[in-house]
Image (cartoon, helix red, strand yellow):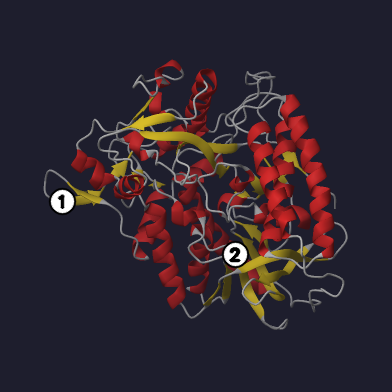
C-alpha cells in the first residue's frame, strides 16, 4: 500500500461499531477503509450472545429503560447520554433488520409475529432483542456481508495499527489526526495509511486478565493508541466481570449468557443451595457487579473453584430452542444443561471506561473519533447494564457519521507523511520474552486488580506494571514489530491506566470494589476518574 493512497475515513476495528459506521458513510459516497487486526470475525461483537436492549413491550417505556440504566451505573452515567442512546433503540433495530439481521420472533395469541424479548440483569422489563443466543454473530455476519459488497468500503484483514499519526508534533493545541502506521501481518511490513478522518472502533481491554469472555483481540489497542497520541482517558477502574463464564479447562473464554438467568436459571452451590438472595433482593437478576462479587465471595469463603448455574428445571425442548449455542457448546464438554448445572466463574467481560468522547464520538484530537467499547461516552457510568453495549455501538456510529459528513468538506489536504523507519531494528530471536511478559501481566492483574481490590494490592500491581513497561519499551525499541508485541505494548499501558484510575477512587462504586473503602462516598457528587497524558 503506497504512502500516497489516501482515504477519506480510516476505521480501525471491524466489530459492530466500526462496520455500522462504515456502511452508513459508504451510503453517502464516502471512501472508507476498515482495518481488522485479525479476521473480520475476530471482534467481540461476533461473540456477543445476549442481545440489544430496546423498548418494544407495551408495558415498558423509555423512561423505565433510562431509570434502569442510571441505577446500574451507580451515579456516574450522564443522563443526557443515556436518554439519547435508549431513545434510539427501535430505530437501531430497524436499521439492523434492513441490513439483513434476523432476530428471534414469536407468535402472539392473535396469530401475529413479533420480536421475542429476553430479560437480563438490571432490566425491569423484557427488552432484549436477540437472535437466539448468538446475537452478535448474526449482527457481525450480516454487516460483514453488506460491507464486502459495498464498492466504497475496503476491508483490510490482518492489519494492526502501530501508531496514530498526528500533527503538529508538540503540544495539544490544534493537533489533528492525519493517518496511521499499520502492520500488515501477512506481508510482515509496516505501511502508511493517510486519512482525513480516523475512527477508533477497537473494542475493550479485557485480555488484561487471565479469565475473560472476550476474544484474544481485546487488548485495549485503541485506548493505548489514543493515550499515546494525547487523548484523555476516563473511568478505567470500572472493568466489568461477567458473572458466568464456563468453568472448564478447555473453555476458559466461553460466556454463559445472562439470558439463562433471565429465563429462570439459578446460581447454586455444588449441593444445590441457592445463595444470591443473601446479597440482593433481585437475586440472579441483580446488576452484574453484584452477582460477580457474590460468586467471588462464595468461592473464596468456601475455597471452591466455581459455582453452578442451573436451568435444568426448565423443559428440555425450551432450553434447546432458546439456547442452542450454549446447549451445543456445553454438550461438547460433556455437560448436558437440560439435565445438569453448568460450572461457572466470573471473567473480565467489558471495559466501561475508555477514550473520552462527546455526544458525536469526537475525542480530544481533531478528526479522531472513538465508537463502541473503546470510548467512554457516559452511557455506562460505573457499571454497564446488560445489552446496552451493542445499542451504544449503533447509536454512536450514527452520531459519528452525521458529524463526519459535516466535517469532511472542511478538512484541509493532508501533509506528506514519512514512511515507517525500520533501519535501526532487527528481527527478534527472543519471542519467549513477549509470551512471558504477557502471562505475568495478566496474572498479577487478576490477582491484584480484579473483582475485589485493596490499596496494597494496587500498589503491588503498579510496581510490577512499571517494571514490565520499561522492559517492553526496551524490547520494542530494538526489534521489528510483530502483532503479539504490539498487543503486549498496548496492554501494559492499559493495565497501568486501570491501576492508576483504581488508586484514585477512594470509595467503592459500581464495578470498583475495595476493602479499604467499602462504602460509596455520599458526601460529594460522584465524579469521573480522568487521566491526562503528558503532552
Q: Which mark is residue 112?
A: 1
Mark 2, mark 1: which one is toward the viewer?
A: 2
Q: Which mark is residue 304?
A: none
Q: Residue at x 31, y 59 (%)?
A: 102
Q: Is residue 147 above or below residue 1?
A: above
Residue 151 in the figure: left or right of residue 328 = right
Helix, strand, or loop for circle 2?
loop
Asked if residue 395 shows in the view, the reply is: yes
- In the rendered image, residue 181, in percent from the top left (x then y), is placed at 73, 70
The quadrant holding residue 201 is bottom right
The quadrant holding residue 193 is bottom right
Q: Residue at x 63, y 43 (%)?
A: 353
- The quadrant of the image that shows the N terminus is bottom right
Specify few, some or many for label 2: CA neighbours under 10 Å numbering under 14, 14-19, or 20 or more. Answer: many
Residue 347 in the figure: left or right of residue 525 = left
Residue in the foreground of this view, choosing between 305 and 51: 305
- In the rendered image, residue 227, in percent from the top left (x then y), is placed at 74, 52
Q: Residue at x 66, y 68 (%)?
A: 197
Helix, strand, or loop for circle 1?
loop
Find disc 2 in the rendering and name its residue: 37
Q: Is residue 242 above or below residue 4?
A: above
- Label 2, label 1: how many angstroms apart (C-alpha)? 43 Å
Q: Residue furthest top?
A: 278
Residue 413 in the figure: left or right of residue 60 = right
N-terminal label among 2 and 1: 2
Residue in the foreground of this view, choosing between 63 and 514: 514
Specify few, some or many for label 1: CA neighbours under 10 Å numbering under 14, 14-19, or 20 or more. Answer: few
Amino acid at each position: 500500500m503506497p504512502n500516497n493512497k489516501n482515504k477519506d475515513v480510516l476505521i480501525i476495528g471491524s466489530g459492530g461499531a466500526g462496520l455500522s459506521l462504515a456502511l452508513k458513510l459508504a451510503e453517502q459516497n464516502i471512501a472508507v477503509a476498515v482495518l481488522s487486526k485479525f479476521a473480520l470475525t475476530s471482534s467481540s461483537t461476533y461473540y456477543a450472545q445476549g442481545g440489544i436492549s430496546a423498548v418494544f413491550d407495551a408495558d415498558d417505556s423509555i423512561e423505565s429503560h433510562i431509570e434502569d440504566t442510571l441505577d446500574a451505573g451507580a451515579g456516574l452515567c450522564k443522563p443526557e447520554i443515556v436518554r439519547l442512546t435508549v431513545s434510539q433503540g427501535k430505530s437501531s433495530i430497524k436499521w439492523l433488520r434492513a441490513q439483513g439481521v434476523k432476530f428471534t420472533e414469536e407468535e402472539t395469541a392473535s396469530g401475529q409475529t413479533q420480536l421475542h424479548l429476553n430479560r437480563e440483569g438490571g432490566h425491569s422489563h423484557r427488552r432484549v432483542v436477540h437472535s437466539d443466543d448468538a446475537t452478535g454473530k448474526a449482527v457481525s455476519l450480516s454487516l460483514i456481508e453488506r460491507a464486502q459488497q459495498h464498492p466504497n468500503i475496503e476491508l483490510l484483514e490482518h492489519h494492526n495499527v502501530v501508531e496514530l499519526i498526528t500533527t503538529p508534533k508538540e503540544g495539544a493545541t490544534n493537533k489533528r489526526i492525519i493517518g496511521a502506521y499499520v502492520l500488515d501481518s501477512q506481508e510482515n511490513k509496516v505501511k502508511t495509511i493517510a486519512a482525513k478522518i480516523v475512527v477508533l472502533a477497537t473494542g475493550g481491554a479485557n485480555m488484561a486478565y487471565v479469565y475473560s469472555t472476550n476474544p484474544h483481540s481485546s487488548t485495549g489497542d485503541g485506548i493505548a493508541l489514543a493515550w499515546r497520541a494525547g487523548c484523555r482517558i476516563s473511568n478505567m477502574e470500572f472493568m466489568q466481570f461477567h458473572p458466568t463464564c464456563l468453568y472448564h479447562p478447555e473453555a476458559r473464554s466461553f460466556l454463559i449468557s445472562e439470558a439463562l438467568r433471565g429465563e429462570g436459571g439459578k446460581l447454586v452451590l455444588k449441593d444445590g443451595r441457592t445463595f444470591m438472595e443473601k446479597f440482593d433482593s433481585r437475586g440472579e437478576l441483580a446488576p452484574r457487579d453484584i452477582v460477580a462479587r457474590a460468586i467471588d465471595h462464595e468461592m473464596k469463603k468456601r475455597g471452591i473453584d466455581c459455582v453452578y448455574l442451573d436451568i435444568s428445571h426448565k423443559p428440555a425442548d425450551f432450553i434447546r430452542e432458546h439456547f442452542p449455542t450454549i446447549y451445543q457448546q456445553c454438550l461438547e464438554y460433556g455437560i448436558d444443561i437440560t439435565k445438569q448445572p453448568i460450572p461457572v466463574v466470573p471473567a473480565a467481560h467489558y471495559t466501561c471506561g475508555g477514550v473520552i468522547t462527546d455526544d458525536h464520538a469526537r475525542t480530544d484530537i481533531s478528526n479522531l473519533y472513538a465508537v463502541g467499547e473503546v470510548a467512554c461516552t457516559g452511557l455506562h457510568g460505573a457499571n454497564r447494564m446488560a445489552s446496552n453495549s451493542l445499542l451504544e455501538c449503533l447509536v454512536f456510529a450514527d452520531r459519528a457519521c452525521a458529524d463526519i459528513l459535516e466535517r469532511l468538506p472542511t478538512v484541509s489536504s493532508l501533509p506528506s507523511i514519512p514512511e515507517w523507519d525500520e533501519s535501526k531494528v532487527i528481527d527478534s530471536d527472543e519471542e519467549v520474552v513477549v509470551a512471558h511478559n504477557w502471562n505475568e501481566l495478566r496474572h498479577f492483574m487478576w490477582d491484584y486488580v480484579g473483582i475485589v481490590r485493596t490499596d496494597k494490592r494496587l500498589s503491588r500491581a503498579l510496581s510490577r506494571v512499571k517494571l514490565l513497561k520499561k522492559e517492553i519499551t526496551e524490547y520494542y525499541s530494538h526489534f521489528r514489530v510483530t502483532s503479539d508485541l504490539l498487543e503486549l505494548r498496548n496492554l501494559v499501558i492499559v493495565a497501568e491506566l486501570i491501576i492508576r484510575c483504581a488508586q484514585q477512587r477512594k470509595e467503592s462504586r459500581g464495578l470498583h470494589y475495595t476493602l479499604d473503602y467499602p462504602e460509596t462516598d455520599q458526601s460529594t457528587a460522584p465524579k469521573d476518574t480522568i487521566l491526562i497524558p503528558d503532552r
